Structure formats: structure tokens, C-alpha cells
Image (cartoon, rainbow, N blue to C red):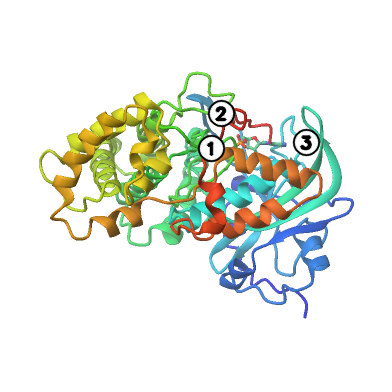
Amino acid sequence: MTLHIPFDNTYARLPAPLFTRQAPVPVRAPELLAFNHPLAQDLGITGDDDVDELGRVFSGNEIAAGADPLAQLYAGHQFGHWNPQLGDGRAILLGEAAGFDIQLKGSGRTPYSRNGDGRAWIGPVLREFVVSEAMHTLGIPTTRALAAVATGETIQRETTLPGAILTRVASSHIRVGTFQVLAARQDYAGLQALYEHAVARHHPEATDPLDFLSGVIERQAQLVTKWMNVGFIHGVMNTDNCSISGETIDYGPCAFMDAYHPMTVFSSIDRQGRYAWARQADIIVWNMAQLATALVPLMPNQDEAIQAFTGAVHAMPDRLNTLWNATLLRKIGIARGQPGDQDLATELLQMMSSQGADFTNTFAALSGDTARDQFTDREAFDTWATKWHTRIKSTPDAEATMQAANPILIPRNHRIEHMIQAAVTGDMAPFTRLMQAYARPFDRDPEFTDLTHAPTEQERVRATFCGT
Ligand code: AMP
Ligand code: MG
């Protein structure tokens, strides 16, 4: 049976400046590395059993029937600085199936490539595959990974590396920066068309741009809180990497925190810690202010719009605070907070940070009686634990609350690095094992106990690179 993808390409019917029709650039020798059959099924894809055909289609060497390949235009603030012209420099949207974008990433140069080669190497491709699928099983809105294909070509980064292409699935690739580019060009007809498209796809209940903005703000507040709950650090929260749908998008130098410290940063290019773990809640407000600015021209009365939009953005920090406070309480087994609970939780975080306790393992161990092992000053922890036990003694659902909030497994950076090193030598076994383990991140499966371990001093990954 041949592959069938039920394409319906609504983005390709939007006004011209939003994209450029562009076919993927063929590769030398495509070889399928991974394919997500359950996701394919959700997309209505059939006949996905011929690995050679999958390799050809998801490298771009063969264009599936019904696809209308294009590269999307966007702009964005990168580390706070306006960049008027970005866009898919190495990605091609094949089209949409079941309402989801199917996009090749690493598929060759486009009109938006600037000085880039349009390609990706196998490291970031497999990193995004594993981490985005893990985010999904962790219950966090995210783009998904459908396929990874080795290209049979080498590409030049710091060294010569094997090339690969990721097929990414998203409920759309509309970014804050997609609105920004049209607003900056004063293309208000295009802006209106994009707005209507985005409303139909993501916020059909929205009655006007203020309502739409509020919807995006709420989704982003929920998203960032969920990131913080699992110690995720996106790494490049530029407005071009901030999705209107509220999904995590663009896994570049992202990483999970091991030892808890709120100012943890991994990205080698984030020298000022703009996108540190705890800062993400401030930055998302800044990003929403940029979206608000881009939406103002859609309103009939500019002054009223500015006032209303400012109100919506200014309400966001409080909303984030509320969400985070509730999240943190759930991590210590409290579903309905009482006065004093927040101090109790904050005290634990402070101890964790000053004693370098592992973020994931400390919270996971609260369900047993080994959490004190995470601390150097165990008496201090015991004093805290006595207070905490007194508080949750009369709370029958504390255990269930904690288990639902605290994953056992997260994609730790050193495991991802190890997996990539193996894949470069042609060994996909670590990839397969990680995919199996992260399919059930809330289970304590003895087979994967080693994956719960924090890195040793030698294993610890200190920096991640955009060198994608
Ligand atoms: P990122 O930081 O990965 O979100 O990328 C920022 C911009 O650079 C996006 O518009 C990308 O499409 C583009 N880009 C990143 N890597 C490459 C590459 N190797 N070739 C062409 N464009 C790229
Ligand atoms: Mg990006």
C-alpha cells in the first residue's frame, strides 16, 4: 500500500507575503531513522509501512500527493532586539493533515535562509524527536515528531557531521513573529487575514482581537507554568519561537535542570541569563506585549485598544503567579491551599537551591521517604518534613496529587548527549531505549532506574548550543 497523507492546505491560501512556495532540496541517500506510527494514525496517514518510501517522502526527495510545499515568513525579537526579516530558513511546510502542519526541518535553503545552509545535523534532529515526544507524554502542549531521516550527506558545523531531517507536526507554526512582521510592514490586509486564520484554527471562540490576545495569554501562561513544573528551560524564547497555539516550539538549546537553581541557563548564547528557568515567566509577558502591539492595528479605535490590551498584558504576571503557586503546592501534595502553605513550599525550594538538590528527584522522592538523601543538611530537611507531614496528614489525596505532578523521568541532558553520540556512530539503541522510557515518565519502572540518576560531575552538560 502506498503512503497517503490527507492534505488540506489552508495556509497556502493566505495572502502572498506570508510565504514563498518552495520545494525541499533533495538529499543524496535518505534513510529512515525513526517514524512515529501512532502520530501518523492520528493525522489520518495510511500506508506508512514501506521504510524506503517513508525515507523518500520525509526527506523531501519525493513530494506526497496533495502537498503544497512552502516556506513561511516571520520576523521577531531575538534576545530583545528586533529582527525585521526571519522566516523558515531551513524548513518547508508540506501542508496540513487533520488540521496539523506537517513540516520538514533541515530540508534545504529557502528565500529566508540568509547565510545558513538550510540543513540540520543528526544531533538536534534526534534531540528534538526525543524531547518533544517526552514533553507530550509529560502532558505539556508541544509540537510533535513524526519522522527522522538521515540524508546520507555530511554538513559542516564546528566539525563535519551527518545530516538529517526532522518532520515536525504542530497545530500550526504561527508565531508571535508572524503577526509582528505584517504589523511592522503596515500590511493591515495581510494582518487581518492572518488573524482570521489564527482565530479559526486556535481560538474559534474569540470574538475580537482582545479576546484572541487574552486566549493566547492564557495558553502561554499555562504552558510556561508547565515548563517550570518539570524544570524545562526553553533556552530561546524569542518572539519568533513563541507559538500562538500555546505549544512548545523550536527545541534548540533547550534543557532540563538537574540540581535546582532558579537562575539555571544552559544555552551558550544566553550570556545574560535572559531565558533562565525562573525568568521564563517574565519573558513570556514581554512576548505577549509584543503580540499585543502587533494586534493593535486590527482594532477600530487605537487608543481604546492600547488601553484594553495593556490591561490584558498587565494582568498576566498575577495569573502566572497564581498558576505557579498552585503548581508548586501540588508538587508537595496540596491540591487546595491554605494560609501558610506557600511559605512551606518556598522553604523547601530555598533549601533545594542552597544545597543543590536535584529538582526532579527531590519532588519524586517526597512520595517515598528518601527525599532527605537529596540534601547535605539532612536535619534541616527533617525539620521541614515534620512540618510538612503535619500539614498533609489529614489530606487523603496528597499522594495522588504528588504523583500526578512530579515525573520520575525527564530527558536529562547527559542522556540526550549520550544518545546523540551513539547515533552519530550509527547506534540507534540508546534512542530507542529513551523513547521507550519517556513514553511513561510518571511510572517508576525498575528497568529505567539508571535514567533517574542525576549526572555525575563528568557527565554533567554545562552548555547547550544553537549550532543546529
Ligand atoms: P532558531 O534560533 O533555530 O529559531 O532560528 C532562527 C532563524 O534562523 C530561523 O528563521 C531559522 O529558520 C534560521 N536558521 C537556523 N538554522 C538555519 C540553517 N542552518 N540554515 C538556514 N536558516 C537557518
Ligand atoms: Mg526558531
Question: Residue 246 location in percent, x, y?
Answer: 43, 50
Q: Quick one: SS at disc 2?
A: loop
Instruction: Characterize the local packing of mark 1: few (<14), some (14-19) or many (20 or more) Cα atoms within 10 angstroms.
Output: many
Going from N to C along the chain, the mark reached first, 1 or 2, is: 1
Q: Quick one: SS at disc 3?
A: loop
CB atoms of marks 1 and 2 within 8 Å: yes
| 19 shown above or below 456 | below
Q: Amino acid at mark 1?
A: Ala
| 399 shown above or below 255 | below
Q: Amino acid at mark 2?
A: Ser
Residue 303: in sight, yes or no?
no
Q: Is mark 1 within 8 Å of ligand 1?
A: no
Image point (84%, 56%), residue name? 30
Question: Residue 221 location in percent, x, y?
Answer: 34, 44
**Residue 267 numbered mark, or none:** 2
Q: Quick one: SS at disc 1?
A: strand
Going from N to C along the chain, the mark reached first, 1 or 3, is: 3
Write down the residue under mark 1: 255
Residues at marks 1 and 3, CA–CA distance in whole angstroms:
25 Å
Write down the residue under mark 3: 117
Q: Is mark 3 within 8 Å of ligand 1?
A: yes
Residues at marks 2 and 3, CA–CA distance in whole angstroms:
22 Å
